Amino acid sequence: NAGVTQTPKFQVLKTGQSMTLQCAQDMNHNSMYWYRQDPGMGLRLIYYSASEGTTDKGEVPNGYNVSRLNKREFSLRLESAAPSQTSVYFCASSEFRQGVYGGSYEQYFGPGTRLTVT
Amino acid sequence: AQSVSQHNHHVILSEAASLELGCNYSYGGTVNLFWYVQYPGQHLQLLLKYFSGDPLVKGIKGFEAEFIKSKFSFNLRKPSVQWSDTAEYFCAVIAGNNDMRFGAGTRLTVKP
């Protein structure tokens, strides 16, 4: 299993350009997520998709759109890139694990996309 | 929404020193807690997790964490760090749904 894969690994955009970050998982997970990681701020949730056909906003959705193409794929689109969107973007997927005392979602992360907007 | 605070931004230790990284969360209900590690240039990997039950959780690579409900804390510990533990450590919480919130991270540097 490849787990969670992301393309591209690196991208440089000019302000105003658009692009789509691709994410795919082969673990048959229902839920998928997009995060951005900025120094000193940890990971912040942009959008997530609890299941195929649904998407919801996270903490920082402005300037982004997402598409849950099918169960495997969840893409993130920047329609008009801005320097403030310079960041490392991580995709994740999760499944619900039922334990002895209860259950939780455990997330698996992709390798990240380093995006620079000039 | 729940939030997570990691009070140590950068910790520098010598090899064999003991480690404790603080994590506090703000949510009054049932939570699931996680510690992730990110080695330089790599993606996040799960160190350990707490669902419920025994508040002392053991993870990989000799790490453990203790959930103290009265203090809303989930501190990460390791008795003796190694140079290879140099990384960034993130505490995270899920409260009642699958919306995970992360702390800002603590960068650990272990000097050989």
Image (cartoon, coloured by chain):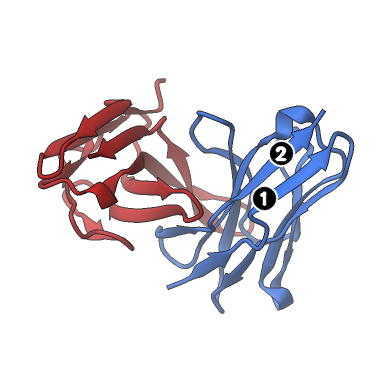
Decide if residue A89 is on the left or right side of residue B35.
left
Q: Quadrant of the C terminus of chain B?
A: top right
The CA distance from mark 2 to mark 1 is: 8 Å
Element class at badge 1: strand
Query: Is residue A87 or residue B98 the one in the foreground?
Result: A87
Confirm whether circles 2 and 1 share one chain: yes
Residue B108: image quadrant is top right
Q: Chain of mark 2?
A: B
Decide if residue A85 is on the left or right side of residue B105.
left
Residue visible at 81% across and 42% down? Answer: B13
Q: Which residue is mark 1?
A: B10
Q: Amino acid at mark 2?
A: Thr
Furthest-front residue in this view? A118
Q: Which chain is red?
A: A
**Residue B81 x %, y %:** 82, 37
Q: Chain of mark 1?
A: B
**Residue A5 x %, y %:** 34, 27
Query: Is residue B58 or residue B6 the one in the foreground?
Result: B6
Q: Amino acid at mark 1?
A: His
Task: Determine whether B52 is above or below A74 in the image.
Answer: below
Q: What's the mark number on residue A65?
A: none
Q: Which residue is mark 2?
A: B109
Decide if residue A42 is on the left or right side of residue B84.
left
Residue visible at 30% across and 60% down? Answer: A60
Whether label 2 touches label 1, CB < 8 Å:
yes
Tell me which label, 2 or 1, sits earlier in the chain: 1
Total labels drawn: 2
Confirm whether residue A29 shows in the render. Answer: yes
Residue B70: image quadrant is bottom right
Residue visible at 16% across and 37% down? Answer: A14
